[in-house]
Image: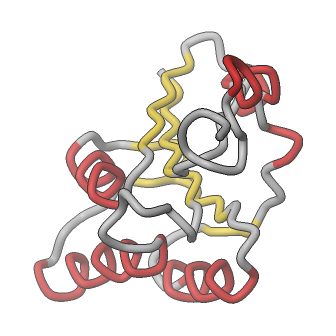
Amino acid sequence: MYRILVIDDQRIFDPGKLSKASDLYVVHCTTSDEGFVTLVTNQPWDEVWLDHDLGLDSTQNGYEMVMDVIDAIESEGAKLDVKQFWVHSMNPVGARRMVLALTRYFKVARIDPTPYLDFDAMYANDRDPYLAGPMQ
């Protein structure tokens, strides 16, 4: 099974665009808390897609969540089985900080998320694709 974790509060990714694997398993977390727990407890992951700006429901942004992961590795000896991190944030400063922090431990790259998005789902049911929840 090819396993992908997406941590993003707003965008919806099309699993068929993320991978052509026939045995694809995709988990989408919308908050830093949910993302952190899922990342560390449901391993291994083939890919983890990270956003920086995780909205008002998150207690942390993506960089702060990444630093908790790094702290768990360095302080507690935690093992994290991730083949590839993709930082897909449109926040250039936050994305760069996330990439630099993860590079010591993992294969990581910055990527534009646009080709992988499910725009039909993002605009469905009067949903504002740039805000969590329905259009005002």
Q: Total number of numbered labels? A: 0
* Residue 29 picture quarter: top left
* Residue 15 picture quarter: top right
Q: Residue at x 71, y 68 (%)?
A: 109
Q: Residue at x 59, y 33 (%)?
A: 134
In which quadrant is the C terminus drawn?
top right
95 to 113, vertically: above or below: below
User: 119 or 130, which is in the foreground?
Assistant: 130
Q: In the rendered view, does 27 fall on the left or right side of 68?
A: right
* Residue 108 picture quarter: bottom right
Q: In the rendered view, does 18 fall on the left or right side of 28?
A: right
User: 121 or 81, which is in the foreground?
Assistant: 121
74 to 53, vertically: above or below: below
119 to 33, vertically: above or below: above
Q: In the rendered view, does 111 fall on the left or right side of 10?
A: right
Q: Position of residue 66 (x, y in %)?
A: 41, 75
Q: Position of residue 132 (x, y in %)?
A: 55, 45
Q: Residue at x 29, y 45 (%)?
A: 38
Q: Position of residue 30 (x, y in %)?
A: 44, 46
102 to 113, vertically: above or below: below
Q: Residue at x 67, y 37 (%)?
A: 135
